[in-house]
Image (tube, rainbow, N blue to C red):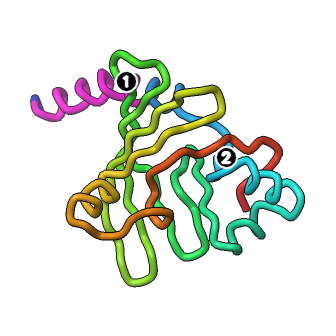
Amino acid sequence: MGSLSYAVAAFLVLAPAAASAADNFISGNYLRSEEICSNAKKNSLQNVIEDGNMVLSARGFDALEYNCAFVEVSKHPRQDKAWLVTAICEEPGLMSPDVFSIVERQSGQLDVTSMRDEVSSIKGSEGGEDGLSGTFYRCDGVTLP
């Protein structure tokens, strides 16, 4: 019974910390460019996704046959707009983990680094535009399908 009490106490102490990291996390939808955002506003976010583009939101990355669900968000201890995020990514026939750093360098602009992309780069694999790392721009006025 004593170990159960410790587990409950640990949960009560850690739960507010996890909630505060998520409370300050990104909001809205982000796309790879402002041009893609304009297209999404004209033709719908669903059409942009069907054209092969990826959307970043607080829930993760969403694309036509690919997604990364964010599992845990940890706030950087010294930067207000920086997070470390663990995720489970899926594509047809494959599920794998990834870790991301997400930093808001300018208002409405996120710099994302994927650990999987970094490892692929070190190994000499092509990541480039197909990877998840890069800059994403907030796209107001569109909602996820």
Give the number of marks: 2
Q: Which residues are magenta?
A: 3-18
- Compared to 117, does 22 lie above or below? above
**Residue 11 inside the magenta-drawn segment:** yes
Is 106 within the magenta? Answer: no
For this rendering, which residue is in front, 106 or 67? 106
Residue behind mark 2 = 29
Q: Residue at x 51, y 71 (%)?
A: 66
Per the model, the C-alpha gap separating discs 2 and 1 is: 24 Å
Please state which of residues 70 and 110 is positioned toward the viewer in this rendering.
110
Residue 43, x across and y down, in percent: 86, 64
Q: Quadrant of the N terminus?
A: top left
In-image side of 23 versus 28 (left or right): left
Residue 121 is left or right of residue 112, and the answer is: left
Q: Amino acid at mark 1?
A: Ala
Q: Which residue is mark 1?
A: 17
| Residue 119 location (% of width, % of height) | 24, 58
* Displayed quadrant of residue 97: bottom left
Q: Label 1: state its secondary structure.
A: helix
